[in-house]
Image (tube, rainbow, N blue to C red):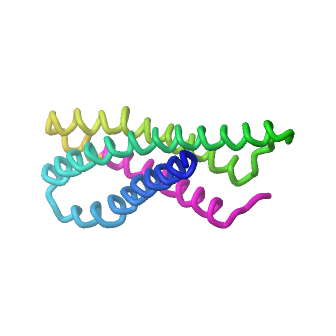
Amino acid sequence: MIYATLKTLHVLAIVVWIGGMVFAHFFLRPALAQLEPPVRLRLMHEVLGRFFKAVLVASLLTLVSGVWMLGRVAKQVVQSGGSFEMPLAWTVMAVLGLAMVAIFMHIRFALYKRLSHAVAASDWPAGAAALGQIRLWVSVNLGLGVVVLLVTLMRWTG
């Protein structure tokens, strides 16, 4: 029961994270392009602030639940007398997931901080540059997230 609950939370956290990136990148950002820089940057700052709080929780929940599920499977295999070898798909998922969390932390604690300072100072060129960097790294994370989903769903085992 606890495994199923953690797996459900794991998947829901990923849905929030990847779904939010898709929404922001492909729907919100283009719709806001028609706004003047001060309005667009203030709005994106507010939206991203809320989204990043949710992603912080989602990324940590994904990390903790993933590690717990891996540990549980490994423990069960070893307790039954077997030798645990993590499947390639799980290894890819874990490595790319860690990379995604690291990238998100850079986005949240470095790039978003630059955006916050620029918006507070009404420095719109600096804000646009910070937002451009956020967009770049969100694109990278979105690409990694799609690869993780493909590897997981296609059950590539190597």
The quadrant of the picture occupied by the C terminus is bottom right
- Please identify the residue farthest to the front as the structure is shown: 1
The image quarter in which residue 36 lies: bottom left
Viewer-nearest residue: 22 or 35: 22
The dominant secondary structure in magenta is helix
Q: Is residue 115 depicted above or below 48 in this figure?
A: above
From the viewer's perspective, is 114 left or right of 69? left
Q: Residue at x 67, y 67 (%)?
A: 154
Q: For the image shown, how many numbered marks are present on the structure? A: 0
Residue 154 on the magenta span: yes
What stretch of residues is rendered in magenta? 129-158
From the viewer's perspective, is 96 left or right of 30? right
The image quarter in which residue 23 lies: bottom left
Viewer-nearest residue: 92 or 31: 92
Q: Position of residue 6 (x, y in %)?
A: 52, 47
Q: Position of residue 26 (x, y in %)?
A: 36, 65
Residue 44 on the magenta span: no
Q: Is residue 82 depicted above or below 148 in this figure?
A: above
Q: Residue at x 70, y 54 (%)?
A: 89
Q: Residue at x 79, y 36 (%)?
A: 79
Q: Position of residue 7 (x, y in %)?
A: 54, 51
Q: Position of residue 38 (x, y in %)?
A: 14, 49
